[in-house]
Amino acid sequence: MNYRILTISFVFVMGSALPNPAAATSQGFAVDGEEWPGFWFVCEFSQRQRAPDDGCKMFDDEGFQLAEGRLRYIRMFGSTETACRGNKKGQCFSASVPKIRISRTDRGKLSLGDKQFKVRYFGCTQIYYFTDTPSYREIWPDKKRCFWASKRRFYIAPYQGSVTITD
């Protein structure tokens, strides 16, 4: 499925982020220096250039952890949800689920800037911008794109429940 490939590609590409000396700041969702506190999941009902139509109440089973100067790809497992996009059982979960289990894979160094971050991959540096809405954070690439970067926008939100990490 192209959606999964793009999400995995985004996480992989972000694994080589360059340092940015500007301290990260944001209004809305927390940004604390070099991290976005918590575990961030892709909104299940978003598409390449379209925001989620459910206010991000349903998460995809894949997401990101941006903490301790590292970017980690995360995957929730054990979902039995059946209301996923494409009727694919277990590939999404409700944002209101009280607790989840995740696995993590390190994808590299990450440094955040003020409303943007840079990713260096295959010798090319890509700038991504982000902004907050009441329900999710939107991420998009600069118009000057590296050969590996798509035009896709990512819509993500932090999970608020309890997380058990099984690395």
Image (cartoon, rainbow, N blue to C red):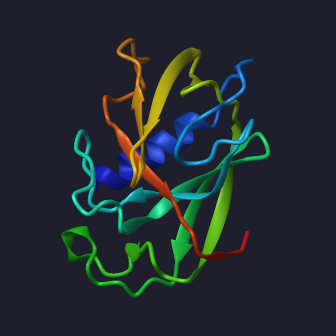
For this view, does 27 lie left or right of residue 3? Answer: right
Describe residue 143's horizontal placement relative to residue 109 as left or right.
left
> Camera-side residue: 111 or 7?
111
Quadrant where the C terminus is found in the figure: bottom right
Taking 67 as reference, is 80 above or below it? below
Taking depth in this image into account, of 139 and 61 the one nearest to the observer is 139
Give how far across and how far down residue 53 sits, in percent.
21, 58
Residue that lies at the very extreme toward the top in this rendered image: 144
The image quadrant of residue 17 is: top right
Vertical placement of residue 157 versus 75, above or below = above
Residue 112, image x, y percentages: 66, 30
Judge left or right: residue 77 versus residue 110: left
Q: Which quadrant holds the N terminus?
A: bottom left
Residue at 61% x, 72% y: name it.
102
Q: Position of residue 77 (x, y in %)?
A: 53, 77
Residue drawn at 45 percent across, 83 percent down: 79
Q: Quadrant of residue 145?
A: top left
Lateral position of residue 87 relative to residue 142, left or right:
left
Number of marks present in the image shown:
0
Task: Say which quarter of the image contains residue 132.
Answer: top left
Residue 108 percent across, percent down from the top left? 70, 39
